[in-house]
Amino acid sequence: MRNSSRFGRVVVFGVGLIGGSFALALKAAGKVGEVVGFGRTVNALIRAMDLGVIDRVGVNAGQEVAGADLVLLAAPVGGIPEILARIAPYLHDEVVVTDGGSTKANIVSTAREHLGESLGRFVPAHPIAGAENSGVAAARADLFRGKRLVLTPLPENSERTVAKVRLAWEWCGADICELTPERHDRVFAAVSHLPHLLAFALVCELAERENSDEFFGFAAGGFRDFTRIAASHPEMWRDICLSNREAIADELDRYSSRLRDLRSAIERGDGAAIETIFGVARAARRAWAKGPSDGLSTATAI
Amino acid sequence: MRNSSRFGRVVVFGVGLIGGSFALALKAAGKVGEVVGFGRTVNALIRAMDLGVIDRVGVNAGQEVAGADLVLLAAPVGGIPEILARIAPYLHDEVVVTDGGSTKANIVSTAREHLGESLGRFVPAHPIAGAENSGVAAARADLFRGKRLVLTPLPENSERTVAKVRLAWEWCGADICELTPERHDRVFAAVSHLPHLLAFALVCELAERENSDEFFGFAAGGFRDFTRIAASHPEMWRDICLSNREAIADELDRYSSRLRDLRSAIERGDGAAIETIFGVARAARRAWAKGPSDGLSTATAI
């Protein structure tokens, strides 16, 4: 940032839904000079150029980062280590780095490993704005508008660095809050990663049956909503599972134990126990849909 | 049906979402003389009168059924046996009975027990048109329009009786198909009952945590869709669980086994196995959203 009113060069690694929307949002806000994109496939980068999401396709990552004000890491979580290793030597004192990964502790530990003394330049972030569509064609300037964004700043970050990254996401329209990386991973294992796993598992279970057409043929609105997230990106979610495996395994264990209780109540015909579980769930779901009771942003409510 | 162009008196037991919508649909189609409603609470029946859903509140069930052309059983599944016992002696040769229950084998076995020689008057049905809202205030004349309706006719039904019941649901705008009661219960255990249980279980698990506000505060769009059905009616779903317990327990076992596989893949860091499950699910979910491949009605697609 040559001055405080805009970023000069922004370098985006991974020009998909998140990276593309970040670029479009900063452009729409008039807060960026040029956007340089890096990615794994040339076709996707050309498409991003055609769509006006990026201004140039990057060739030399070190050179681009050396002249950048802001770097966004928006590749699938599994691709982050290699990018960090590549850019580490070029992180000068004025550049700030953020990311859009759905897990944080693992990315922080990778960053600690690769960035060395430049670790303080990196302010991890997670925009709560997923969609089952992926790819640059799904990118929108307003994807983050009114959505939560969790920053998980590090002890090594200066106030100024955090402020810069915060500003970038604010210019995208996001509603910022802060958590520790560990707390972030714990919370999102429960409210995001687990539901995705559960939906993937159900659809896969039905799809692999011999008569799967009959089952899908009678699936209706409840199934549609429940399984919408099973159309999410397999590679992205594979990386999330691997990156946050302890918290996810723990959530899976708690959930499986809950299912065993429910199964046992059904088997013994214990209507009161079943109705209690369903009643607690309905009341909580309705209260949540009405909006938060704890003074948090309303952006996460319906 | 005094003539083939409309029903004279229709008696509805349970004037909620399904019973109320059935009454409104027949009225909107001009296919009913009067609708008489029975229910457990006077307030709900008065509300149904005020809303024009029913024309009269029934007092003497036997007398009303004796003068009826069509009877709909739309109470929660657990309330059906008592109603069947009450109306059995009054099922004359011209009346037909149908229901809106989400399970079928158990209702058929109850009917077999209570209706005796009149069993042939009863043609079981399941309209695939649930909603997380319940009660007569949620009833709509177009609830069944374009939606699947599964008839599970009995060997004791005459062709004429099945045709009458089919006509009633067709006049409501439903798209009719037939299954055996057992097949129906198997299919719906998988695509409807299990997803409801899974959603109830997740929301209950989070709601009972000490810091549940923090978890719900970060829940976003994926969680919203996944858990929409957790706002469904606890008593109705309790009854469905009790009524279809064997098929549901079996589905829960298959699903739990699938979750164990997934957990084990996550624990051993087997990205390929995880990605395969997610990839199969995504492809199946996308194919389903595009519409049925087997020539079935498109009503169940998005």
Image: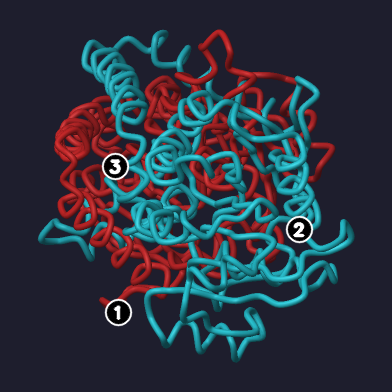
Chain colours: A cyan, B red
Residue type of the residue flagged with mark 3:
Leu
Q: Residue at x 24, y 32 (%)?
A: B248
Q: Hey, which quadrant is residue B217 in on the image?
A: top right
Looking at the image, residue B256 sits to the left or right of residue B296; the answer is left
> Chain for mark 3?
A
Residue B283, relative to residue A76: is it above or below? below
Q: Residues within 10 Å of mark 3 (few under 14, many from 20)?
A: many
Q: Is residue A163 visible?
A: yes
Of badges 3 and 1, the one in the foreground is 3
In front: A219, or A183? Answer: A183
Q: Residue at x 45, y 41 (%)?
A: A116
Asked if badges 3 and 1 are on one and the same chain, I answer: no
The tag on residue A296 is none
SS class, disc 3: helix
SS class, disc 1: loop
Provide the residue designation for mark 2: A172
Residue B205, relative to residue B67: is it above or below? above
Residue type of the residue flagged with mark 1:
Gly
Q: CA distance from mark 2 to mark 1?
A: 45 Å
Provide the residue designation for mark 3: A242
Provide the residue designation for mark 1: B295
Q: How many marks?
A: 3
Q: CA distance from mark 3 to mark 1?
A: 40 Å
In front: B208, or A84? Answer: A84
Quadrant housing the N terminus of chain A: bottom right
Looking at the image, residue B182 sits to the left or right of residue B27; the answer is left
